[in-house]
Image (cartoon, rainbow, N blue to C red):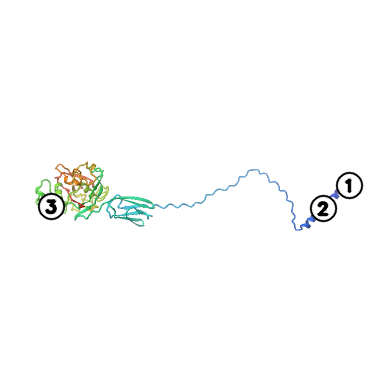
Amino acid sequence: MRKYLWIAVIALIACTVYFTSCDKGQKMMDTIMPDAEQVETPETPEPAPEMTAAVEPTVAEPTEPTVAEPMPPPTPVAILAVEPPGGSRISPDTTIAVTFDGAPADLTVSIGELSVSDANATITGPFMGGSLTLNLIWADGIETLSYVVEEAVPPPPEGMVAIPAGDFEMGDNDSGVAQPVHAVWVDAFYMDTHEVTNLDYKRFVLANPEWEKRKHGGNYLAHWDGNNNYPEGKANHPVQYVNWHAARAYAEWIGKRLPTEAEWEKAARGGLVGKPYVTGDFRRGTDSNHGKDTTPVGSYAPNGYGLYDMSGNVSEFCLDHYDPDFYSMSPSRNPLNGALPSNTIADLDALVVTESTQIVLRGSSWVHGDHGVAHRYFIGPSGAHPGTSFRCVQDVNP
């Protein structure tokens, strides 16, 4: 019993000593750092709860960048019209007008003087004779224009027009008697503005009695009376019922000659290229005389060269022998079929015509429908018929 009592006493004393020493230690700390905060011993954190399931990370949806709407490219400026159009025959002083669908930027031209006003441009010469190629260049494009510049001709004699030198496309592939189309060069010449009239021819007959009606048989001057009088009221109508011999004699008397077939067609086209009619792509009833008789010369509008009745009224004699195959072997410069050895106008003096020769007639008449500018007719040199007449040409002096 005592034993246990002593143990208890000893334990009490030990506790008293311990707590006494702790109180003194605290008091000592308060003396050294009276303002120090009391630092509590941090509690041990509780362990995180276990994850029971995987959590998918949140990913933000990508956003497309905002792109500005692109501006449409500007519409290129283009040519609307050219006058005269490419491919035309022009004179050295022609003004070429070009119309664009907007103002062309940085426009230049290879030849000629250029003037630009908004969407319109003009090109002026003078241009040299022969082939002409113009290159138009601007910011949005390039255009090539080709022309044939016909050389200037001295002023013609009264009652004639000047036909400039140059080449042209002769014939018509759609016509059985005018094939093939072929390029022909013709030197400059003058041509009567209208056909020889009854009054003109009467002057010839009075000056040359050998060509009076009574001295020739057949249909020669069949519409005149025996006193060399033409029908009343028809002084200004073309003479008819003359033959090739008489027409050539008249031309020589007046200091001229009959045209070659190539000269006639070049003149009749009036500068138009590749057109089936004297008037272009079409022929209206008001364009030429295809009625029941002749009309006064010059009753219809002239062609591009200022020539009247190159279609209708009367057909006209040429110098050439008629040969349906001549176009396939024709010389390319100043052709004249039957003028041997060259078959060109250079050998005109060698042209021989016999009664068996067929002579070329050109131009439709009041007797025929209009078969087109390239159509060819033929007749014997002594033949004299209604709707058959002529006009004259003259060489240009060098």
- Of labels 3 and 2, earlier in sequence is 2
Q: Earlier in the sequence, mark 1 or mark 3?
A: 1
Q: CA distance from mark 1 to mark 3?
A: 188 Å
- Residue 287 placed where, x, y %? 23, 51
* Neighbourhood count class around disc 2 (C-alpha, 10 Å): few under 14, some 14–19, many 20 upward: few
Residue that mark 1 sits on: 6
Mark 3–mark 2 Cα distance, whole angstroms, equals 172 Å
Cβ atoms under marks 3 and 2 closer than 8 Å:
no
Most foreground residue, 27 or 257:
257
SS at mark 3 in the image: helix
| Location of residue 323 (image quadrant) | top left
Q: Residue at x 86, y 50 (%)?
A: 13
- The three-letter amino acid code for the residue at tag 3 is Phe
Q: Which mark is residue 35?
A: none
Front-most of 256 and 231? 256
* Residue placed under numbered mark 3 in the picture: 204
The amino acid beneath tag 2 is Ser
- The residue shown at (37%, 51%) is 141
Judge left or right: residue 391 versus residue 18: left
Callout 2 secondary element: helix
Q: Which residue is mark 2?
A: 21
